[in-house]
Image (tube, rainbow, N blue to C red):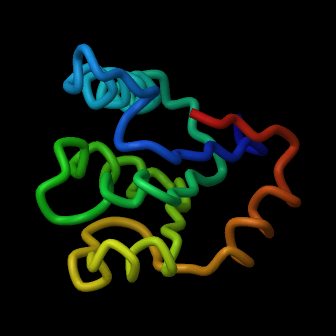
Amino acid sequence: MKDTVILVTHYGMGNTQDAPELPVKLINKYFSLLLENHNFPAAICFYTDGVKLAVTGSPVLELLKALEANGVRLVLCSTCLDTFGLSGQVQAGIVGGMGDILEAQIQAGKVISL
């Protein structure tokens, strides 16, 4: 997966009205398995509600820090952070623009959207 970029656009994986905790539970498991398998993507890009996973209080923050420590580039959309008032709460990754996210996608051999 070294040439893969993962896009995270939700606060978790998927959306559901009936079980709002499910998307976070799924993304937690997904990131945990990435770490366990040592099969790391080149980058994970966060935008829209996805940026909320890399800020203070996120339930997957430690997993993201561990992925970053293993060389995974985490890119957070600055416009999204500003819109949600979260710019000062980033705890993992780098704050970039849509140009950085686009560049990661262009360089990727495969893009996975969660």
For residue 45, what is the image quadrant? bottom right
In this view of the protein, which residue sits in the foreground, 26 or 40?
Answer: 26
Count the marks: how many?
Answer: 0
The quarter of the image holding the N terminus is: top right
Q: Residue at x 12, y 57 (%)?
A: 57
Q: Residue at x 25, y 23 (%)?
A: 25
- Above or below: residue 23 compared with residue 55: above
**Horizontal placement of 14 versus 111: left or right?**
left
Q: Residue 3 placed where, x, y %?
A: 78, 44
- Above or below: residue 97 compared with residue 69: below
In the picture as drawn, the residue positioned furthest to the front comes out as 17
- Above or below: residue 56 compared with residue 61: below
For residue 55, what is the image quadrant? bottom left
In this view of the protein, which residue sits in the foreground, 26 or 49?
Answer: 49
For residue 23, what is the image quadrant? top left
Q: Residue 7 placed where, x, y %?
A: 61, 46
The quarter of the image holding the C terminus is: top right
